[in-house]
Image: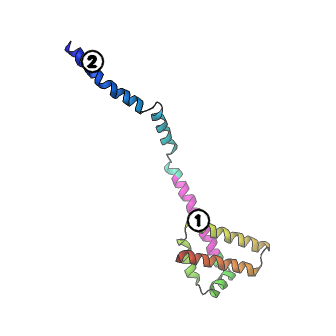
Amino acid sequence: MKQFVNSRFMLRALMPAAMLLALAVPRGAAAQAASADQDHIVSAQTLQQQVMSRSADRQRNVDTLDQMLTLPQAQKAMHDAKVTPEQVQHAIPTLSDQELSDLAARTRNAQQQFAAGFIGTGLFTIIILLVILIIILLVVR
């Protein structure tokens, strides 16, 4: 009989805790949490691919600006602005990904328009000079 009383006492003590626990964690919450965790897991291979892709994009943008610096118009524009090619070449890698991407896109666009004859040598030289000055200004800030 004493065991029965102790069991009843234990049941009365544990019942509110069990009810509180059942109400505190709604049904499906554990399943939703597990599902959400799996949705946010990124594999190492996916991360590596993203890093490689961004690295390749950045290198392509650096190469675009480096090629622009070798053009005779760029050489003349740097000489007129009293900027050495080394200053600009050392500044390019310090640009953020966004700045680098924007300047490379502008440079590619100007080169395409110049090649197609939409802009003349004078305007192309001004665009190149502006890109060079932007690079220098972004690094100095």
User: Does residue 77 lie above or below 106 as drawn?
Assistant: below
Q: Residue at x 67, y 70 (%)?
A: 106
In 3D space, how far apart are the residues under numbered discs 1 and 2 (Cα atoms)?
Answer: 69 Å
User: Does residue 97 lie above or below 16 as drawn?
Assistant: below
- Give yes or no for residue 55 being in the magenta stretch: yes
Disc 1: which residue = 98
Q: Residue at x 37, y 27 (%)?
A: 19
What kind of element bears circle 2? helix
Q: Which residues are magenta?
A: 47-67
Q: Residue at x 50, y 38 (%)?
A: 35
Q: Position of residue 76 (x, y in %)?
A: 67, 85
Label of residue 8 in the image? 2
- Give yes or no for residue 57 being in the magenta stretch: yes
Q: Residue at x 28, y 25 (%)?
A: 13
User: Does residue 59 lie above or below 18 as drawn?
Assistant: below
Residue placed most toward the observer, 89 or 129? 129
Dot 2 amino acid type? Arg
Which color scheme did the rendering employ for the protein?
Answer: rainbow
Dot 1 amino acid type? Gln
Q: Position of residue 121 (x, y in %)?
A: 75, 80
Quarter the N terminus occupies: top left
